[in-house]
Amino acid sequence: MVFEKLTDALHAARQEQELPDYLAEQILFILDNREKFRGREDQLAKLTEQVSLYDTYGQTGYLGMGVSNLILEKSLQRLIDIQPEQQ
């Protein structure tokens, strides 16, 4: 179920918030390699929430709930174990 929610959040963020391709590609990597991320549902749920709250312009959003590309990038790095110099 968490993967389906992440897929929906990714689609919405790409359509409505212009999610950068490099972030979308990392999320697609997770979705394409679900077996590697099983057992990490809590982290994936948090990522899904962040993708849903993504704000193209790094605004704070309603009641300070917006998520910038930097916050999302750090979450993806922790989840996928990507080193910044490898991007």
Image (cartoon, rainbow, N blue to C red):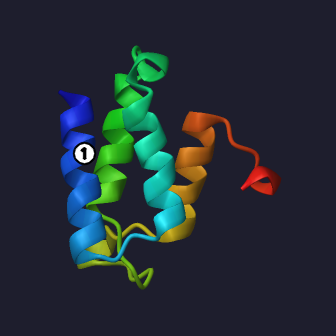
Q: Quadrant of residue 73?
A: bottom right
- Percent x, y for residue 49? 29, 50
Q: Nearer the viewer, residue 67 or 21?
A: 21
Is 25 placed above or below 63 here? above
Q: Secondary structure at mark 1?
A: helix
Please identify the quadrant where the N terminus is shown: top left
Q: Nearer the viewer, residue 71 or 17?
A: 17
Please identify the quadrant where the C terminus is shown: bottom right
Q: Residue at x 33, y 73 (%)?
A: 64
Location of mark 1 (residue): 7
Q: Nearer the viewer, residue 62 or 38?
A: 38
- Percent x, y for residue 33? 44, 27
Is 57 placed above or below 13 here? below
Q: Residue at x 20, y 63 (%)?
A: 12
Q: In this rendering, would 83 be left or right of 9?
A: right
- Percent x, y for residue 8? 18, 50
Q: In this rendering, would 43 be left or right of 12?
A: right
Q: Quadrant of residue 32?
A: top left
- The amino acid type, in three-letter code, at marker 1 is Thr
